[in-house]
Image (tube, rainbow, N blue to C red):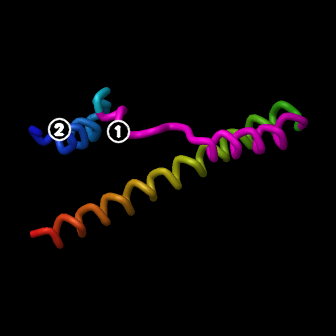
Amino acid sequence: MENSVISAIQAATRGYVALEMGELAHSKSRETEKAEQALEAVIRPMKTDRAEMMRELAADLTSAYEDLGFQNGFRMAVRLMAECQ
Protein backbone atom coordinates (compact mmCIF):
# COMPACT_ATOMS: atom_id res chain seq x y z
CA MET A 1 0.00 0.00 0.00
CA GLU A 2 1.38 3.37 -0.97
CA ASN A 3 -0.11 5.52 1.81
CA SER A 4 -3.42 5.70 -0.05
CA VAL A 5 -5.38 6.57 3.09
CA ILE A 6 -2.89 9.24 4.13
CA SER A 7 -2.94 10.66 0.60
CA ALA A 8 -6.74 10.63 0.60
CA ILE A 9 -6.85 12.55 3.89
CA GLN A 10 -4.36 15.07 2.55
CA ALA A 11 -6.38 15.48 -0.65
CA ALA A 12 -9.59 15.88 1.38
CA THR A 13 -8.11 18.94 3.08
CA ARG A 14 -8.04 20.50 -0.38
CA GLY A 15 -11.64 19.52 -1.10
CA TYR A 16 -10.92 16.42 -3.19
CA VAL A 17 -12.64 13.16 -2.34
CA ALA A 18 -10.84 9.99 -3.46
CA LEU A 19 -13.45 7.65 -4.90
CA GLU A 20 -11.58 4.52 -3.85
CA MET A 21 -11.83 5.65 -0.21
CA GLY A 22 -15.61 5.69 -0.54
CA GLU A 23 -15.49 1.90 -0.72
CA LEU A 24 -14.25 1.85 2.88
CA ALA A 25 -17.22 3.74 4.27
CA HIS A 26 -20.95 3.14 4.29
CA SER A 27 -23.39 6.02 4.08
CA LYS A 28 -26.49 4.14 5.24
CA SER A 29 -27.39 1.25 7.48
CA ARG A 30 -30.60 -0.35 8.69
CA GLU A 31 -30.44 1.90 11.76
CA THR A 32 -29.92 5.12 9.80
CA GLU A 33 -32.77 4.20 7.43
CA LYS A 34 -35.12 3.62 10.39
CA ALA A 35 -34.08 6.88 12.07
CA GLU A 36 -34.49 8.80 8.80
CA GLN A 37 -37.98 7.36 8.28
CA ALA A 38 -38.99 8.17 11.87
CA LEU A 39 -37.77 11.75 11.53
CA GLU A 40 -39.54 12.18 8.20
CA ALA A 41 -42.78 10.83 9.70
CA VAL A 42 -42.63 13.59 12.35
CA ILE A 43 -41.62 16.34 9.90
CA ARG A 44 -43.97 15.50 7.01
CA PRO A 45 -47.18 16.88 8.65
CA MET A 46 -45.50 20.23 9.48
CA LYS A 47 -45.88 23.40 7.46
CA THR A 48 -43.39 23.59 4.61
CA ASP A 49 -41.11 26.29 6.10
CA ARG A 50 -40.96 24.63 9.51
CA ALA A 51 -40.38 21.20 7.94
CA GLU A 52 -37.48 22.53 5.89
CA MET A 53 -35.99 24.18 8.97
CA MET A 54 -36.25 20.87 10.87
CA ARG A 55 -34.56 18.99 8.02
CA GLU A 56 -31.70 21.52 8.01
CA LEU A 57 -31.30 21.27 11.79
CA ALA A 58 -31.26 17.47 11.57
CA ALA A 59 -28.63 17.63 8.81
CA ASP A 60 -26.50 20.03 10.89
CA LEU A 61 -26.74 17.75 13.93
CA THR A 62 -25.88 14.70 11.82
CA SER A 63 -22.84 16.47 10.36
CA ALA A 64 -21.65 17.52 13.81
CA TYR A 65 -21.88 13.93 15.09
CA GLU A 66 -20.16 12.67 11.96
CA ASP A 67 -17.26 15.11 12.49
CA LEU A 68 -17.00 14.11 16.13
CA GLY A 69 -17.01 10.42 15.22
CA PHE A 70 -14.24 10.96 12.69
CA GLN A 71 -12.12 12.87 15.20
CA ASN A 72 -12.65 10.25 17.90
CA GLY A 73 -11.87 7.43 15.47
CA PHE A 74 -8.75 9.19 14.26
CA ARG A 75 -7.53 9.72 17.83
CA MET A 76 -8.13 6.06 18.62
CA ALA A 77 -6.30 4.97 15.45
CA VAL A 78 -3.30 7.14 16.32
CA ARG A 79 -3.20 5.72 19.84
CA LEU A 80 -3.44 2.18 18.45
CA MET A 81 -0.57 2.83 16.06
CA ALA A 82 1.54 4.26 18.90
CA GLU A 83 0.92 1.14 20.99
CA CYS A 84 1.94 -1.13 18.10
CA GLN A 85 5.49 0.21 17.93
Tell me residue 29's x, y (percent). 57, 41
Q: Measured along the vertical axis of the image, is residue 71 above or below residue 7?
A: below
Q: Residue at x 44, y 57 (%)?
A: 69
Residue 29 belongs to magenta span: yes
Tags 2 and 1 in contact by the CB under 8 Å rule? Answer: no
Q: Residue at x 73, y 40 (%)?
A: 53
Tell me residue 33's x, y (percent). 66, 39
Q: Which residue carries the number 2 mark?
A: 4
Stretch in magenta: 21-45
Pick the front one: 34 or 10: 34
Tell me residue 77's x, y (percent). 27, 61
Amino acid type of the residue that numbered disc 2 sits on in the rendered structure? Ser
Q: Quadrant of the C terminus?
A: bottom left
- Density class for disc 2 (Cα within 10 Å; few <14, some 14-19, many ≥20) is few
Q: In this rendering, would 71 be left or right of 57?
A: left
Residue 14 belongs to magenta span: no
Amino acid type of the residue that numbered disc 1 sits on in the rendered structure? Leu
Tell me residue 74's x, y (percent). 31, 58
Pick the front one: 10 or 23: 23
Q: Quadrant of the N terminus?
A: top left
Residue 56, image quadrant: top right
Q: Which residue carries the number 1 mark?
A: 24
Mark 2 or mark 1: name the one nearer the start of the chain. 2
